[in-house]
Image (spheres, rainbow, N blue to C red):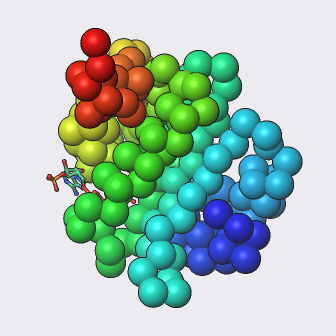
Amino acid sequence: MALSDIDQVLAIEQRSFPTPWSKKAFISEITDNIFASYMVVEKGDKIVGYGGMWVFLDEAHITNIAVAPENRRTGIGEFILKQLIATAVAGGAKRMTLEVRASNHAAQRLYEKMGFERKGLRKGYYTDLREDAIIMWKDDLVQEGASGRASSGH
Ligand SMILES: CC(C)(COP(=O)(O)OP(=O)(O)OC[C@H]1O[C@@H](n2cnc3c(N)ncnc32)[C@H](O)[C@@H]1OP(=O)(O)O)[C@@H](O)C(=O)NCCC(=O)NCCS
């Protein structure tokens, strides 16, 4: 994600989350946060999705993933998550975590499909709608990132 992508990213963000991040938040993430990694998916010259995370020591924490409403259910969300996992593994992460709204079944399905498990609940974490956060973890990142290589050696 580059600074020039942010206006398109914001448009998706605003159509995807009850409390969207501000422009300033995205700018600060990609220019100031050395632990942050953000990517966009483009179709032609249009941004159709994005995702980001923090990688700190051996843990990766997903901050957001969103796909433009008209481009959903075509595999883009899964593609972004796979790219984040590969980038996290390359950066030394062994585990990955995220919080997801209790009502957000689409995202929970995506994460479960990718091997994330429910490990906790933060009551009232999302203060806007007083909604609980489900905390999910994926502990087998390295195996996943190295799939194909793990079994080829001795
Ligand atoms: C969650 C989100 C990123 C998924 O993106 P997407 O591109 O539509 O997802 P994909 O097409 O890659 O779907 C991958 C898997 O996710 C699950 N999934 C995605 N959308 C789903 C839905 N509406 N209902 C049920 N399962 C869904 C399915 O398991 C799907 O696999 P399948 O196609 O084999 O059934 C998208 O719905 C979105 O942007 N939502 C708003 C923002 C958001 O909630 N982000 C997550 C914050 S934690």
Q: Is residue 132 visible?
A: no
Query: Residue most toward the top?
Result: 154
Most extreme residue toward the front is: 154
**From what the image shows, is residue 34 above or below residue 106?**
above
Foreground of the two, 94 or 4 = 94
User: x%, y% of residue 17?
Assistant: 50, 57
Instruction: Give the residue displayed 79% in from the left and 60% down from the top.
Output: 27
In this view, 23 is above or below 153: below
Q: Is residue 151 visible?
A: yes
Foreground pick, 148 / 142: 148
Work out which residue is located at the far right of the displayed protein and give it. 32
Q: Quadrant of the C terminus?
A: top left
Above or below, comparing residue 43 to residue 62 in the picture: below
User: Which residue is at a point 45% across and 87% down the rendered structure image?
Assistant: 44
Residue drawn 64% across the image and 47% down it? 37
Q: Quadrant of ligand 1?
A: bottom left
The image shows residue 137 at horizontal and vertical percentages of: 40, 22
Q: Quadrant of residue 112?
A: top left
- Quadrant in the picture for the N terminus: bottom right
Give left or right: position of 153 versus 87.
Answer: left
Residue drawn 35% across the image and 55% down it? 79
Query: Is 8 displayed left or right of 31 in the figure?
Result: left
